[in-house]
Image (cartoon, grey):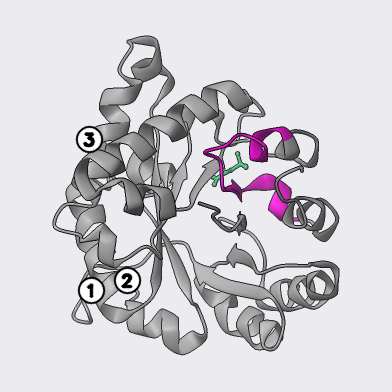
Amino acid sequence: MSRPVIITGNWKMYKTVEEAALFVKNLAPLITKPTYIAVPFTAIKSAADNAKGTQVVIGAQNMHDASEGAFTGEIAAKMLLDAGARFVILGHSERRRLFNETNALVNKKIKRALSEKIQPLLCIGETLEQREAGKTEEIIRSQLLESLADVQLDQHPEILLAYEPVWAVGTDMAATPEMAQEAHHFCRQCISEKWGEETANKIVIQYGGSVHPDNAQDLLNEPDIDGLLVGGASLTVESFSQIANLGKSP
Ligand code: PGA
């Protein structure tokens, strides 16, 4: 079964309204397939306006799990959609580590995203300590199953998954293609056990963590790596367009 290759940029807390608009304008003519970018909340509208009629798909990096309410400083799925976002990153390791997001909270957000029809991109991955303690598979399995508890994944093949080992995020120490493949294969096996092989074969699993133009192709060539989640290297049109145009080597 062939899955589409999906490349996503994650800008984190970088870029103003104007910078985002200019980036999208410059990137759009250079890309050859749908390419996702998760931008700061304030830049969603300008980025999405400039992405209209192009292959750039704009998304957000987080949202609240309630549909609306008295939650000062938070943002709801319908607000993201209204501003032009089409997907949302949930459970990024920086949210888990710095803002105490648990699998249970991420699960509520995933369910909200599905009910409001914004495409979720779920991030999972182990810390260095967990890997060194031989707990990588245990952590992947629990993050995956708990974040997707009560989710009928077979009914939602649009859910994107990103395996991002925490030790590789922003460190310039990417996982080797072999290590990443092993983890991706394990993710697919967990999905298969819970939701069946057909669903497991449909789910796009991106790798993230220190992806750059010089290691992206080797990662993408692994059979279970269907895309990349790119942080630092998504901040310039030059490096991101190189990665965005990659597919599997024939
Ligand atoms: P990085 O970030 O590419 O800068 O390591 C990846 C991410 O946080 O999604």
Quarter location, residue 216: top right
| Separation of residues labelled 2 and 1 (CA atoms) | 6 Å
User: Few, some or many C-alpha atoms within 10 Å of disc 1 (few <14, some 14-19, many ≥20)?
Assistant: few
- Ligand 1 placement by image quarter: top right
Residue annotated with mark 1: 71
Looking at the rendered image, the quarter that the C terminus falls into is top right
Query: Residue sitting at 67 percent across and 37 percent down?
Result: 221
Residues under numbered marks 3 and 2 in contact, where contact means CB atoms less than 8 Å apart: no
Q: Residue at x 81, y 60 (%)?
A: 237
Q: Nearer the viewer, residue 185 or 244?
A: 185
- As for residue 46 lying within the magenta part, the answer is no
What secondary structure is marked by label 1? Answer: loop
3 or 2: mark nearer the eye? 3
Residue, disc 2: 74
Looking at the rendered structure, the kind of residue marked 2 is: Glu
Residue 142 circle label:
3
The range drawn in magenta is: 218-235
Q: Specify whether 94 is left or right of 168.
A: left
